[in-house]
Amino acid sequence: MQQVLFELSTGLKSSITVPIGWLDRVLSHVEQVESILRIERVQYLDNPPHWKHTKFENVPDNLLCNITERHNEWVRNVYESLASWSKTPPTDGVPLTPEQAARFWPALEMINVSPERWTAEYYENRMQHLFGIMISKESEGVTFGAKALTPRQAGAVILLLEPYLDRHDTRLSVPKGCDFLTADYEWCEKCCEAIYQGEPCNKRKCPLRDEEEG
């Protein structure tokens, strides 16, 4: 389930206090993202402006994924900061008016990258995010909303998604005896297990154990 900050979803209703220089940093980030990803703002009638939806056709995959990760984290941080400052203003700060906030509010939107554009690093980060949610660790404001899975069960779900999302042959897995998702393992065909790199297998006739002992 996605966390939603309803009290901030449509803009500021009144001024709040923010740290000195914070607004300039925010506007700089927004200008950079809109410039690099070539995002346009549009407005319908009297509704607030918003980002025009685009498929980022002219942006390389690597750049798109890198900017998306950085921007989406920035969005979460801005919402969390504003929610915190609305309750406990910073000691030394300046007012942020609704009019000033409207200058960057259209950018408080998560960017979605279609799976066919995912780089190997982005795929692994998204799967780590999903894995964390399934084992009942809140991740990026999202919770599972159901009984937590064991790491092995969550790893099995990732394995089911692999044919549809893993375009780079990353092959993430939860190694035997581990509680984390990784690509840093060796596969033992005899044991039918992923063995974390550098860890010995406890089966006497495991080929990987023979290699280490030999």
Image (cartoon, rainbow, N blue to C red):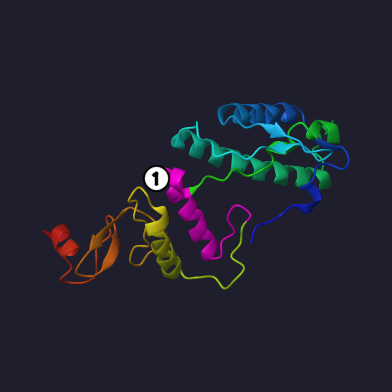
Image-based side of 45 in relation to 57, left or right = right
What range is drawn magenta here? Answer: 115-141
Residue at the left extreme? 214
Residue 153 highlighted magenta (yes or no): no
- Residue at (44% x, 49% y) in the render: 123
Name the quarter where the C terminus is drawn: bottom left
- Viewed as shown, does residue 189 lie left or right of 75? left
Q: Tag 1, which secondary structure?
A: helix
User: In the rendering, at what x and y percent does residue 68 appear?
Assistant: 55, 40
Q: Where on the picture, by quarter, is residue 200?
A: bottom left
Instruction: Give percent across and percent down for residue 30.
Output: 66, 31
Q: Residue at x 25, y 69 (%)?
A: 192
Image coords of residue 108 (percent x, y): 69, 41
- Left or right: 185 as drawn, with respect to 150: left
Callout 1, which amino acid?
A: Ala
Placement of the N terminus among the 4 image quadrants: bottom right
Figure quadrant of residue 194: bottom left
Most common secondary structure along the magenta stretch: helix
Q: Considering depth in this image, is 85 or 122 the residue closer to the camera?
A: 122
Q: Is residue 97 visible?
A: no
Q: Residue at x 43, y 50 (%)?
A: 124
Q: Is residue 167 visible?
A: yes
Tell which residue pokes out farthest to the right in this image: 14
* Vertical side of 64 occupied by 179: above or below: below
Horizontal relation, residue 89 to residue 194: left or right: right
**Residue at which label 1 appears:** 120
* Nearer-the-camera pick, 35 or 28: 35
